[in-house]
Amino acid sequence: SAGETQMRWTKQLLRYLAHDPEKGIILAPGSKLYLHGGSDADWGGDEISQKSTSGDYLSLGTLGVIVCSSKLQRKVADSSTCAETYAAHELVRKTIEVEGKLREMGFNVPLPVKLKQDNDSVIKMGKNPIAHAGSKHYRIPQAFIRGAVDDGLVEFEEVSSAGNPADLF
């Protein structure tokens, strides 16, 4: 699947960063390697299917983007919050995977990982289990995000839509 391919590529890149710095990326001793990223979605952007497109990225310190994707969501979202939740859920999954791989390689990544988000409802539902009738069908992704926030792994930073780098996806 596309997700497995993305994670396989991520693992290869992280191994490269850890073991072959002489090839162009330098990891200096004592350098702080921190993850940061963002996600965004265009609600109903596909004119034929009315599905939304999710976009996300993860960067490693100032070295640049190490994971990014842009793909059509599998389900039709009936609100912008739903579409943004699906996008944020995918980013949190990738963050957990990448942080774990970095930890396995001996890098101490400061937590929580800061993730940019331009949807206020996604940020609020990531902190508080708000039960709205309209959000019933995407409660599981919300619960997954909230678990990562509660565990201190990720923290959402609110940005304007224009200030969200993931908007380009």
Image (spheres, rainbow, N blue to C red):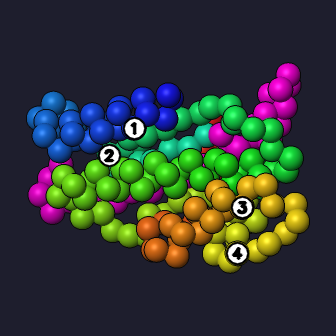
> Which mark is drawn over residue 129?
4
User: Label 1 sits on what residue type?
Assistant: Met
Task: Measuring from the top left, give residue 144's x and y in whole percent.
Answer: 58, 62
Residue positioned 80% across, 44% down in the render: 77
In the image, is residue 39 part of the stretch drawn in magenta? yes
Task: Measuring from the top left, give residue 16's x and y in whole percent.
Answer: 21, 36
Q: CA distance from mark 4 to mark 1?
A: 29 Å
Pointers 4 and 1 in contact (C-beta within 8 Å): no
Q: Nearer the viewer, mark 1 or mark 3?
A: 3
Whether residue 158 appears in this view of the structure is no
Q: Which residues are magenta?
A: 27-54
Q: Residues within 10 Å of mark 2 (few under 14, many from 20)?
A: few
Q: Which numbered disc flags the more N-terminal residue, 4 or 1? A: 1
> Which mark is drawn over residue 63?
2
The image quadrant of residue 108 is bottom left
Residue positioned 71% across, 61% down in the render: 139
The residue that mark 1 highlights is: 7
The residue that mark 3 highlights is: 139
User: Label 4 sits on what residue type?
Assistant: Pro
